[in-house]
Structure formats: structure tokens, C-alpha cells
Amino acid sequence: MTALIDFAESAKHYTLSIRLSTDGFSFSVGGSSGDGGEVAGGSFEVNVQHSLAANLKQFLAQTGELGHAYRQVNVLMHTDRYTVMPLDMYEDSLAEKVFYQNLPRRSNEVVLCNVLGRSGAAVLFGIDKLSHLFLSEHFPNARFFATVSPLMEYFSVKSRECGCRSLFVHPTPGMTDVVAFDRGRLLLANTYPTAGGDDCCFYLLGVWKSLEYSQEDDRLYLVGMSASAAGRLTERLAKFVRHVEVMEAADNIPFDMQSLMLCE
């Protein structure tokens, strides 16, 4: 989807958001506040036989919209290589140490941090060094995010609005993000490997039970799924959770990318 935009003005008025995932890359170009929101976007099919850096190099070379300067550039990394810690315990000098206490060490990795004011948390995540170098050279003003970070910030607001304990479930190909809040207070954020609806139900109901959520009073939100997929999962969950609600993403925009736009 690409609308007519004036790329000569992109450095003044537009924000570019890029999402990187093992199942494909996507991007969107949005206007400044009041300019009408998202105006262009597209996707790029990755070669699973090639490295992230090799796919990224091809993506940057073949996608014309990425060759312009922008007011702001956001890079979202869809990954389960992250760990969350309370914001008041975070220190820059300890980021890498804390990260590798929770995840296996990789030599070709840069550890980055997202500071989340709404959630009161710091998200430490890893990205391939060469990919980070390509993007930093191509977009000197780029900000890097784990995709779970804008989700947590957006869900924090929604949790406060609902006034109860809430579990947000965001399935993507091969993974499911699960974020739990108690009236805006973060209880848990994790990403589980899932191959389908049965895996998804197993993990999220396990979280629901471990946090002692109420079947009658607390809420479970299915996020960013198609109506048919959400309907099938809701049917499976109905016997365990009374309040299951569906939050759909805008057309052709991954929900985590959409949530970043909404949190800006």
C-alpha cells in the first residue's frame, strides 16, 4: 500500500517504522501529528536460507522508500531474546550482565535497552551486530525496539482503563507474546514458542492459573489476530475464562508496529 507522498519533505514531516522478523520484513511511513496518519507501507519476503543481515542488506537495497531521509526512524525487532527488569533497578553499566544471566550468550550480538515509563520497566534485548551496523549506518537517527516494548506500553494503558487484572495475548507465526497487568501494574511479560492454537492455550492458561486470575472477574485480550483465528481461540477459551475480548490490528499493519504509533 503506497499513497502519494512528497518524499522531498520526508525529513521534516514523516516517520519511518521498520519491523524485522524471521517470517518477513515490513515498513510503514506515517505523517507528523495531524498529517493523516499512516500513508505508505509495504512488506518484504525474506529468504530463510540467508542470515538476517543478508536479508536486511537486500531489503535496504530493493525498497525505494527506505532510501529517503526521515524525521524519525523506528526499527522494531521481533524477537524472544529479551528480558524485563524493574525500571528502578536498571543501570546502563549492568545491562549486558543482566541480559546474559537470563539468556545464552552470543558473540555476534548487541544488547540494547528500551526504557518504558508507562510500564515502569526496562526491556533488554539482543540484535545481530552486523544488522545493527547496517541499520545504524543507513539511518543514523534510528531508534531500536523489541516488538514487545510498545506492546507493553500500550497494554499498560488499556489495563488501567479496564480497572481489573488483564492478560494480553499477541500470537505471531511461531511465537506468542503474553503480557499480564494488575490495573496497569506489570506482573509478567514473556514470549513463548507456539506452533498453533493448542500451544497458545497451554501457555496462556498456565499463566492465568499461576497468577491466580479470576475466571469470572478478570479479562483476557486476544490481540492482532484475524477474526476467524480469534473466533476459534475464543471458543477454546470460553470454558476457562468468562471475559475474552478481541483487539484487531489495522489492515496490513502488525499490531506491535501499530502500538508504537499509538504510544508516540
Image: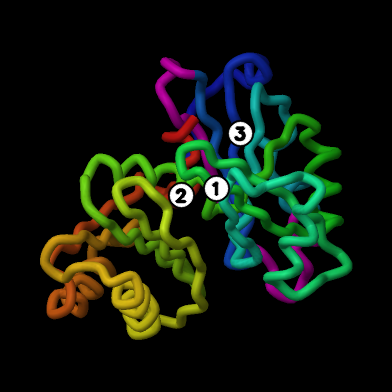
Res. 225 in view: yes
Assign a secondary structure to mark 3. Answer: strand
x then y, percent, for residue 249 = 35, 49
Which residue is depicted at the point 45% across and 49% down? Answer: 151
Q: Nearer the viewer, residue 101 or 167?
A: 101
Alpha carbons under labels 2 and 1: distance apart: 9 Å
Amino acid type indicated by mark 2: Met
Assign a secondary structure to mark 2. Answer: helix
Q: Is residue 119 left or right of residue 79?
A: left
| 48 in the magenta segment | yes
Circle number at residue 152: 2
Q: Of tags 2 and 1, which is closer to the observer?
A: 1
Residue identified by numbered label 3 = 16
Q: Earlier in the sequence, mark 2 or mark 1?
A: 1
Look at the numbered discs 2 and 1 and tell me whether their residues touch, using CB distance below 8 Å.
yes
| Local crowd size for mark 2, using a 10 Å CA cut-off: few (<14), some (14–19), many (≥20) | many
Q: Give the vertical position of 249 relative to 7 (above or below).
A: below
- Write the start and end of the magenta stretch as one range: 33-56
Look at the numbered discs 3 and 2 and tell me whether their residues touch, using CB distance below 8 Å.
no
Q: Of tags 3 and 2, which is closer to the observer?
A: 2
